Image (cartoon, rainbow, N blue to C red):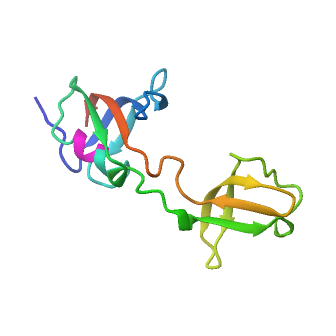
């Protein structure tokens, strides 16, 4: 059978869980996820785990945070005065927003905290600092 190798388009189903067993994402009920192996389109640890798998093969792998979304970086949290944010923007904790850096790049942030005077924005990926477990099944290689 053909094994998945760098440059192949791999189609796979997956369920991703945290160390407590809670599901954070799954392809269940959807089309399989497709990506080019070795092209940096999915997290590094999962890309490496799928390399060498064959169609129909299933496995469960745990990806450490440094091979997933990286470590949690406290310096990626920033408190800003509430008056610097337009009043129409929702600031409930957990709200995802887009900020623009001085050089024009868009950066996704999450409202971590908000009170009358200050809003704390967190630019860490929501899964940063977390080890992730994936149950994967390769359904096609092409």
Q: Is residue 74 left or right of residue 59?
A: right
Question: In the figure, 12 relative to 82: above or below?
Answer: above
Residue at 23% across, 50% down = 7
How many numbered discs sit on the rendered protein? 0
The residue lying toward the viewer, choosing from 124 and 106, is 124
Q: Is residue 113 one of those drawn in magenta?
A: no
Q: Is residue 39 left or right of residue 113?
A: left
Q: Residue furthest left?
A: 1
Percent x, y of residue 55: 21, 27
Percent x, y of residue 114: 78, 55
The residue lying toward the viewer, choosing from 69 and 80, is 80
Magenta-highlighted stretch: main secondary structure? helix
Image quadrant occupied by the N terminus:
top left
Percent x, y of residue 129: 44, 51
- Write down the quadrant of residue 8 in the picture: top left
Q: Is residue 102 left or right of residue 6?
A: right
Residue at 17% across, 30% down = 54
Image quadrant occupied by the C terminus:
top left
In the image, the segment drawn in magenta is 46-50
Residue at 88% across, 55% down = 88
The residue lying toward the viewer, choosing from 132 and 136, is 132
Residue at 79% across, 63% down = 118
Percent x, y of residue 107: 60, 63
- Write down the quadrant of residue 75 in the picture: bottom right
Q: Residue furthest bottom?
A: 103
The residue lying toward the viewer, choosing from 62 and 118, is 118
Q: Is residue 51 left or right of residue 83?
A: left
Question: In the figure, 107 relative to 34: above or below?
Answer: below
């Amino acid at each position: 059978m053909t094994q998945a190798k760098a440059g192949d388009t791999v189609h796979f189903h997956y369920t991703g869980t945290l160390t407590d067993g809670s599901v954070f994402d799954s392809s269940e009920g959807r089309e399989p996820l497709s990506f080019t192996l070795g092209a940096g389109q999915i997290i590094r640890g999962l890309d490496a785990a799928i390399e060498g798998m064959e169609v129909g093969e299933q496995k469960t792998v745990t990806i450490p945070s440094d091979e997933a979304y990286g470590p949690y970086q406290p310096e990626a949290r920033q408190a800003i005065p509430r008056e610097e944010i337009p009043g129409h923007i929702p600031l409930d904790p957990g709200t995802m927003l887009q900020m623009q850096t001085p050089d024009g790049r868009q950066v996704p942030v999450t409202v971590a905290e908000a009170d009358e005077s200050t809003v704390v924005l967190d630019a860490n990926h929501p899964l940063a600092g977390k080890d992730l477990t994936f149950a994967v099944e390769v359904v096609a290689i092409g």
